[in-house]
Image (cartoon, rainbow, N blue to C red):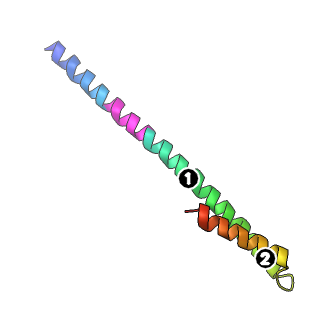
Amino acid sequence: MPNEKFSDLAHRIRRNQDDLAKQAKELSELRSELARLKQIMGTVSEALRCIDTYSYKRGMTSDAEKKAHAQLAEFMTKGF
């Protein structure tokens, strides 16, 4: 009888360890995805800031416009 209890307990411990390992892997994947999303947000924010900054100064200069378009193009190609 005691061996059955220990065997059952050992089985539950292994199952819990497996569950924890799966959760740790999922957490790692979520952290990676969050980092990627933060990078995308940074690119978009910078592009929008550039557009806002230069659009209020009597229209965009060609350099500012090129920078804004380049940042948006980077977002569109790398962001997804």
Nearer to us in this view, 5 or 65: 65
| Residue at (49, 49) in percent of width and height | 30
How far apart are the alpha carbons under marks 1 and 2? 29 Å
Please indicate whether residue 70 sits to the left or right of residue 60 in the image. Answer: left
Q: Label 1's element? A: helix
Relative to 59, does residue 4 appear above or below in the rendering? above
Q: Residue furthest top?
A: 2
Mark 1 and mark 2 lie on one chain; the one further toward the N terminus is: 1
Q: Which mark is residue 65?
A: 2
Q: Is residue 70 magenta?
A: no
Please give the range of residues in magenta: 16-24
Classify the position of the C terminus by image quarter: bottom right
- Which quarter of the figure has residue 53? bottom right
Please indicate whether residue 68 sits to the left or right of residue 79 in the image. Answer: right
Relative to 56, does residue 26 appear above or below in the rendering? above
User: Which x, y percent locates residue 76?
Assistant: 60, 68
User: Which x, y percent locates residue 15?
Assistant: 29, 31
Q: Does residue 33 appear in the picture of this structure?
A: yes
Local packing at callout 2 (Cα closer than 10 Å; few below 14, some 14-19, many 20+) is some
Relative to 52, does residue 40 appear above or below in the rendering? above
Please indicate whether residue 58 sits to the left or right of residue 79 in the image. Answer: right
Marks 1 and 2: which is nearer the front?
A: 2
| Residue at (84, 74) in percent of width and height | 63
Return the residue at label 1: 34
User: Which x, y percent locates residue 34?
Assistant: 56, 52
